[in-house]
Image: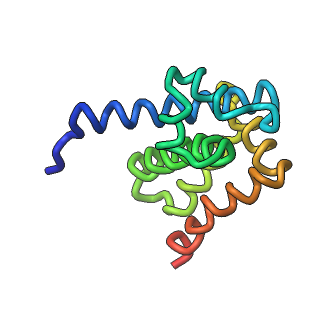
Amino acid sequence: MTTPPGLRERKKQATREALREAALRLAVEQGPERVRVEDIAEAAGVSPRTYNNYFASREQAIVSAVTADREARVAAAVTARAPDVRLADAVTDAVVEQYTDPGAHGQEALLLVTTRPALRAAFLDATAGLGPPLTT
């Protein structure tokens, strides 16, 4: 049995999530080139110094928002999949849902990370390890 995270860890996770959400929202609204680390920190209610404890760049924060959403959706899909559904199909469906869900920023996020060179490079770095576990 795993021990639930303590208060400090929950606060760190909440701060990371607030920074991710702010980074993605601001990038979608203003364009990633116009978003400064200070803007993200302010929107998340933390100092720029605190921001730098979590992310090294705005690109990293934006991409982290996209990959964290994908990881949560994939984990939920794998946990809930029926025995007759292949693992690869469950994962694929979860990823497709992320980018087609009209209530999320998925489509805008995908457009951002595929059309902006700095975001594309950061996204590819962040997702490089996804393929091999699914194909072996």
Q: Residue furthest front?
A: 49
127 left or right of 34 in image: left
The reply, left or right, for residue 78 in relation to residue 116 is: left
- Foreground residue among 80 and 107: 107
In x, y percent, where is residue 110?
A: 75, 44
Q: Position of residue 122 (x, y in %)?
A: 68, 56
Q: Nearer the viewer, residue 121 or 82?
A: 121
Q: What is the tally of numbered marks visible in this picture?
A: 0
State the residue at coordinates (77%, 24%): 29
> In the image, is residue 37 above or below residue 121?
above
Task: Give the quarter of the image for residue 97.
Answer: top right
Q: Residue at x 50, y 72 (%)?
A: 133
Is residue 125 something that shows in the picture?
yes
Q: Residue at x 74, y 59 (%)?
A: 121
Q: Residue furthest bottom?
A: 136
Q: Residue 101: x and y, percent?
A: 67, 33
The colour scheme applied to this rendered structure is: rainbow
Which residue lies at the image location 41% right of the left edge and 30% below the top edge?
14
Left or right: 87, with 97 as reference point? left
Please, is residue 11 above or below residue 2 in the view? above
Relative placement, left or right, of 76 versus 114 is: left
